[in-house]
Amino acid sequence: MHIPDGYLSPQTAGGLWALMVPVWYAAGYKVKKTLSARQAPLVAIAAAFSFVIMMFNLPLPGGTTGHAVGGTIIAIIIGPWAAVIAISVSLTIQALFFGDGGILALGANCFNIGFVLPVTGYYTYRLLSRGAAEDSPRRWFAAGIGAYVGLNLAALITAVEFGLQGDLFKAADGSALYSPYGLSTAIPAMMIPHMAVVGVIEAVMTSLIFVFLLRNNPSLLHSYDGIRAAATGRLQLKPLLIGMALLLVCVPLGLLATGSAWGEWGAEEIQADVGYVPQGMDRYLGRWSGILPDYAFPAAEEADTGEEPAGAVSLEGVKESVPGYMVSGVVGLALVGGLAWFSTRLLTRRSRKKEQLD
Amino acid sequence: MTEDAALPDWLTGHGRKRSRDWTPGDSRRQSAIAGTLLGLSRLVRDSVFSEKIASRPGLLQNLDPRIKLVGMLSLLVTVSLLRNWYLILPLYGFTLVMAAASRISLKLYIRRVWLFVPIFTAIIVFPSLFNVVRPGDPLWVIRDFGHQVTLGPWSLGTSLAITYQGVKGAVLLILRVVTSVSLGVLLALTTRWADLLKSLRVFHIPRVFVLILSMTYRYIFLLLAMAEDIFTARTSRMVGPSSPREDRRFIASSMGTLLGKSHAFSDEVYGAMVSRGYNGEPVISHSFRTRPADWFWLASVTLAIAIIIGGDRLLG
């Protein structure tokens, strides 16, 4: 699932970097609050473990071998947020030193394997094992299902990232600029082997490790409960994450609305409504059209400028512009989030310095 | 390969034949455990080897790691922005020149780059050459059916052909991947790992992350040695072949053991750090100093990037 460089457009890779920065910040905050100074050695050794576990070959039926990621079992033991940092660190070392996964694509790889996988895996495990007795088989079963769900969701998101390249980034003659397959090819091509084989390996290995630890080292499976109980001051991230996801899902709704937002008219609209364009306005219009004009990618836009009369909505048009619009939403959200975080940090740092001076 | 001469045989894998004798039984059954052992030793070999090249004098080795990182990343971004395949070629040539100037054996460098990712890419991209998968203008018609062919719900069109767009896209993707991998390998081969991680501070990556990264890199080798011990201990006690089911169970329990060991180990490391005065605020010390040659290199890289991107935009 490690995406090498060259498969993703810089827009996608950059967008996922921007998305990962607030995630790392939040994870770092959580881990610092729960583990304080202990975080460095624990996370570092968990990262080294995640690196080594990816090198273990497993015998598969038919004489071939495969490898597991181990994200879910790490999240169960050190907690999902510490796991996000540990797996990201391990992916960074793989990309920088061993050429496994691209350097520009590192943001994407950390998002898929380092964030989506352990967090979904962990919460699925928690959901399914809620209220289960200490030695109930439901617990190791839940760990396996969590690993399966987490891995396949990560694979699905990877497939969507690949598929967007084929659908959105084309040269003028229609040839692919990055990964050549669209969503309709990339999703089945990724999901069939992951659901049938890779996810099963991950689930079986996670359950086997879980059972082994249950028998030989049960305290390890509770170490995160202890950390959570001892945590001081908690940052509530769940409502924020759910809210962000809901808003993102609603993004394409905007495509159904016609006309411009109040006060955001273009020159033609003002001409039509008022009868003339104010001189000062005319001078500045069109100077800056934005990085993603009309919230779409250049390629998608070319396809879009058909003979449609302005303001009409065709289902085809909406379908075509949804991915571009979504990605714009993600990029925008990430940029705004990043800026907000950055400015808060600047402000709090200044006030902290002041406090020290006083 | 003169570079290998300084490394002992057991590390380079030349004496690897012996490992086959460790587990009796058919070779297929051995592959999981022996393959893992081989992978572990190959990783150690590669990194020892990288450190050797990185500590030799050469063009890239002499650059300030921060300048080198910024320059290499700018080149990577450039490679990902270009829309014409023939403009990526001079950049690939540039990596070869830099490798030669850094006294890296070209044969070895090219093999390391081409061996895995580009071949994998070629396999992935192969189906997209055909009009059945990705429509386009036919370049070479392999077979004309003369009528509409359908396979279940899919319509395959009237002919099977390799398309112009497919070939163009494939060449572009492979060149992009090769050049990106080349740049990454060049950065890793010519920079000592401790310097590379410290230079990440240029991007204002928090100190604690840099500390975690360098601790991780160190402990990878410790955990690898632990894993190797577990595997060797097992294979040296085996008399007959083991079933894949048994192997799976064994591998899972060694992962569990490793997990428990490393967790306990992190406690000890923390204790050791605290007793040496660690209070949660790491200090990263370095003695990087830029020289005129560094800035000259960065300026020439920037100029090359500007020319190539300008050319790309002109050609459309």
Image (cartoon, coloured by chain):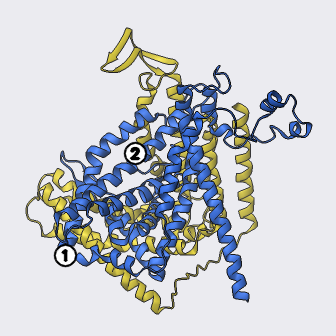
The circle on residue A216 is 1
Tell me the quarter of the picture where residue B149 sits.
top left
Residue assigned mark 2: A156
Residue at point 47%, 38% (across, down): A163
Q: Which chain is blue?
A: A
Q: Position of residue A152 (x, y in %)?
A: 34, 49
| Chain letter of disc 2 in the image | A
Q: Is residue A162 above or below residue B262?
A: above
Colour seen for chain B: yellow
What amino acid is labelled 1 in the image? Asn
Q: Is residue B86 above or below residue A85?
A: above
Q: Earlier in the sequence, mark 1 or mark 2?
A: 2
x and y percentages locating residue B43 in the rendered image: 38, 62
Identity, as a three-letter code, of the amino acid under mark 2: Leu
Screen quadrant of the N terminus of chain B: bottom left
Q: CA distance from mark 1 to mark 2?
A: 35 Å
How many residues crowd mark 2 within 10 Å: few (<14), some (14–19), many (20+)? Answer: many
Vertical comparison of B160 with B203: above or below: above
Residue in the image at 17% along x and 62% along y: B249
What residue occupies the far top of the structure in this picture?
B146
Q: Is residue B97 left or right of residue B39?
A: right
Residue A288 place in picture, x, y as percent: 78, 42
User: Where residue A290 sits in the image (x, y, percent)?
Assistant: 72, 43
| Element on which disc 2 rests | helix
Q: Nearer the viewer, residue A182 or A139?
A: A139
- Residue B309, quarter of the rendered image: top right
Residue at horizontal 43 percent and vertical 51 percent from the top: A2
- Foreground: B212 or A35? A35
